[in-house]
Amino acid sequence: MKRLLIWGASDQAVVTLDCAQAMQMYGQIDVMGIATQPIRRFVQHRVLMEENVIHAEMFHAYDEVIVATGDNRLRQIRLQILKEYGIPLATIIHPSAIISPTAQVKHGSTILANAVIHTFACISTGCIINTGAIVEHDCVIKDFVNISPNCAMAGHCRVESRAFLGIGSTLAPCITIGEDAVIGAGAVVITDIPVHATAVGVPAKIIKQDVC
């Protein structure tokens, strides 16, 4: 069986570990985090301390590595390091998730319990699709996106890189969410949201837009 390293020891790592165990395809699962993280939650697993300087040799003992952090930019940085080192990326999909045979889930992404990825949807590299989220037909989720629990998006939506969708948010059909945009918890999005914008409410309204 394969050996997996989870890079991260935060809350995201805890749920990623649970998901990886449920897959029953890894004979060894280790965790790598920093000393300030609550590593006591991984008492049944080997925990490696992350060094200030990351070396390729740290990863060579594993068949696959998954980056487990909810910080989209940090996840992007770590995945780029792994890519440069030629380290194989894991794709973690909970057995209870429903993935259409025509959907695509790229390496380095995590799909948690009871998520639904419908027909011809595409989940790009390094995404997190959390518990119970629904990605409908023909949606495109670009790299390093984080979709919170119980989000729902109708068909033909597009979520650009590093965007964050808060818990329970809803996207109407054909909506585009720009790069690095943030959608607040429970928001209902009925118009496109531009890059670097934060939108909240029902219907969602932009309350902040950072300079690119």
Image (tube, rainbow, N blue to C red):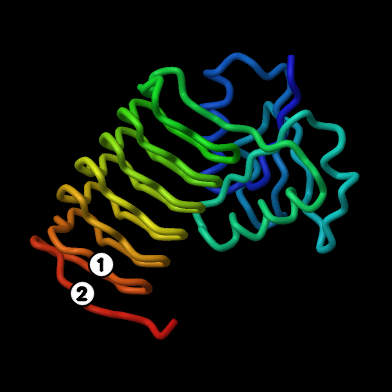
Do the residues bearing badges 2 and 1 touch, measured as CB atoms within 8 Å? yes
Q: Considering the numbered disc 2 on the image, is that residue within a helix, a strand or a loop?
A: strand
Which quadrant, please, contains the N terminus?
top right
Q: Mark 2: few, some, or many residues within 10 Å (few <14, many ≥20)?
A: some
Q: What label sits on residue 84 in the rendered view?
A: none
* Residue 46 visible somewhere in the drawing: yes
Q: Is residue 26 left or right of residue 150?
A: right
Q: Mark 1: few, some, or many residues within 10 Å (few <14, many ≥20)?
A: many
Q: Which residue is mark 2?
A: 206
Query: Residue drawn 78% across and 53% down?
Result: 84
* Residue 116 visible somewhere in the drawing: no
For the residue pair 113 and 188, the one nearer the viewer reads as 188
Image height of 125 relative to 18, above or below: below
Q: In x, y percent, where is residue 118?
A: 30, 29
Q: In x, y percent, where is residue 192?
A: 22, 64
Q: Is residue 203 left or right of residue 35?
A: left
| Amino acid on which disc 1 is placed | Ile
Query: Residue drawn 37% across and 46% down?
Result: 140
Q: Which residue is farthest right? A: 57
Query: Residue drawn 28% across and 80% down?
Result: 208
Image height of 45 relative to 51, above or below: above
For the residue pair 47 and 55, the one nearer the viewer reads as 55
Q: Quote the CA–CA distance across marks 2 and 1.
A: 8 Å
Query: Residue drawn 22% across and 55% down?
Result: 175
Q: In x, y percent, where is residue 148?
A: 34, 47
Q: Which residue is mark 1?
A: 193
Q: Which residue is farthest left? A: 202
Image height of 186 relative to 7, above or below: below
**Which of the 4 image quarters holds residue 205?**
bottom left
Which quadrant, please, contains the C terminus?
bottom left
**Which of the 4 image quarters holds residue 201?**
bottom left
